[in-house]
Every structure is written in C-alpha cells, then in structure tokens.
Amino acid sequence: MVDLFGKKKLEDRISELEEAIAVQEREKEELVRTLQKREEKIKRLTSANQEANLALKAMEQKTATMVASSPEKTETERPKARLPEAWMPDNRELDLLIQRLQGFLSPREDLLVYAFPGSLPKDADIPPQIRRVAMEIKSQRGGIIIYCPQLFALQFIPPFPIKERISWEGSSFQLSWIEEMMNTPALVVSAHAGSTFLGVALSREGFAVNEKVESQVKEKHSKGGWSQKRFERLREEDIKNHLDAVQEKLAGLQSKYGSIVKYAVLGGEEGLIRQIAPSISLPLVERRLKRHDEKDPDSLLREVYGFKCYRIDINVIEAERSNAI
C-alpha cells in the first residue's frame, strides 16, 4: 500500500523525537542528582558554622546579665574598652560548642588553633588584627585561640595553665588541649572561715574524695575599744584552730593523692589562702572560689574546670583590614 501522506515518515520522526526527549530527561535527572550532591556538600560544610554561631549567640545572651552584674573581675582578666565580654559556658554548652567546632572541615587547611602560656607574645604567628585584640585579654593561665578565616575567632582562658606555646593549622581544629583539661586530676581547696572544703577530682565529672572542715569562727564586728581587741583576739584564735584542722586534712590528701593529681586549685578568703598556700607542694592555681554549696555540689566543679570564653568580632577585623587596604 502506497503511503500517500507520509505516515511512516511521521511515525519514524515521532520515535526519534521521543528518544531524544528520553535522552534529555536522563541527562536532566543526572544534572539534578549532581546539583543535589553539591548542595548537600555545601550544607554539610556550612551547617557546623551556623550551629556554632547559634550556640555562641545563645550563650552570649544567657550570660549578658551575669556579666553586667558581676563586678568581681581581676585586673589581669578585665577586658579594656571595645573588647568582647567574657562568658563561662556550663558543661553542656561547652560540649556542644566543641562538638560544633570539631565538625568544621576546610579543604584549604587554614583552621588555626594557637595555645600560649601567660600573656600572648607580640610575635605570635596569628593574624595581626586578632593578635592586637587578644593581647588585651590577660590571664596568668595563658589562652587558646581558635580561628576560622572570614567566619569567627574565639579565645579560651583555660582552667589550668598552658605550659608551652603550640600552633596548629590544618583542615580541622585540634582541640585535644581542651579535652585534656576537662580530665585533669586536681586537688581543690575552697577556704572560708569556719567552713573549708577539700576535695580530689579526677575530672570535671565529680569529686572522688571530699572532706569538709567546719568550726566555730566568730563573725566580725566593730564595737571598738577593749571589747573589740578582745573579740579580734578570740576570732584569730578561732581561725588558727580552723587552719590547723584544714592543714591536717590537706597533708593527708597530698600524701595519698599527690602522685595522681596535677594541680592544687586554691581559692576562697584571701587571708586564709595566704596561710594555706605554703603548705601545698603541688603546682598551685589560685582561683576565685565561692563557699561550697551543699545544695549545688557541682557548682564548685564548674568554677574549677570552667573555661572563660571571648568571641572576637570578625566583622570589625575584616573592616579594619579593608580600611588598611
């Protein structure tokens, strides 16, 4: 039969077009899968930064009122004008922050961790804009700077002294120093007239051993005259008896656990600290420790093992860099 209207050719052409459409659909699906993989990779690379920023902002907001109402800062740790305020994350917040930081990966291998003892040296091998700000943050225990170019910079004041200067730069953050300090055994003495706490902590998780020395110590008063002098003499005798009992307990703990613990953390009332310190044979770290609270036994551990944190404003740094250029 003669194909007068070219039906066979039309059918063949339709088949060719349908096949071409099918090829294009397959190519389109392949491109979509490729784009999805790229988007997932981008999301993985940025999600850690977004979550870390959210965690940092939440902690800053939570501690803003605490910082404003806490006048008891030492001169060595008081930031000057325009410096970021410090905050002290609790264990859960610190664990979350470290988890986020460990999630960062940089193919450029430019994630920096810089640890230093004492004050930040002028020749520190870190970006000059960060060095200028970090040098104003003082602490006898040194510091740990964590820097992700164009995203954020943090400075941690550790609970125990940094012993040597170490710089590490790579595709991820080296945070072993922070994790080691969380598990550093310490002898803790919180000395207060009439109530002194002594404990041995193998890590931040709790005290393996703890003892409390309690005794009657007369409260201060200011009546004046002979009565005042007699009262002060009696109070001094009470304090001496209290110190004798504390030093007896301290000697026993040092003898038994001195080979295990790395530091003695001493805090409390200044007068008592000065008299107890010479009796301590371990490396000494002086801290501002409150009276031990029986209702909140973990509060003392948070003070001993807590990291003070500063967030250095990257926007300010980048603006200064642009102005310099």
Image (cartoon, rainbow, N blue to C red):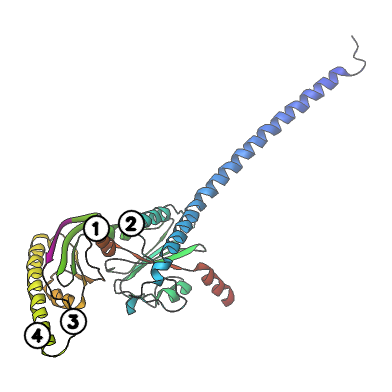
Whole-Å distance between the Cαs marked 3 and 4?
Answer: 11 Å
Front residue of this view, candidates 188 and 172? 188
Residue that label 2 marks: 91
Query: Badge 4: few (under 14), some or many (20 or more) residues near its Cα, within 10 Å?
Result: few
* Residue 260: % across, % down: 15, 59
* Nearest to N terminus: mark 3 or mark 1: 3
Which mark is on residue 295? Answer: 1
Front residue of this view, candidates 213 and 281? 213
Whole-Å distance between the Cαs marked 3 and 1?
Answer: 29 Å
Front residue of this view, candidates 138 and 321? 138
**Residue 310 visible to an observer of this rendering:** no
* Callouts 3 and 1 close, C-beta under 8 Å: no
Mark 1 belongs to which amino acid? Lys
* Nearest to N terminus: mark 2 or mark 4: 2
Identity of the residue drawn at 84% across and 17% down:
8
* Nearest to N terminus: mark 1 or mark 4: 4
Mark 3 belongs to which amino acid? His
Whole-Å distance between the Cαs marked 2 and 4?
Answer: 47 Å
Magenta-highlighted residues: 208-217
Query: Badge 1: few (under 14), some or many (20 or more) residues near its Cα, within 10 Å?
Result: few
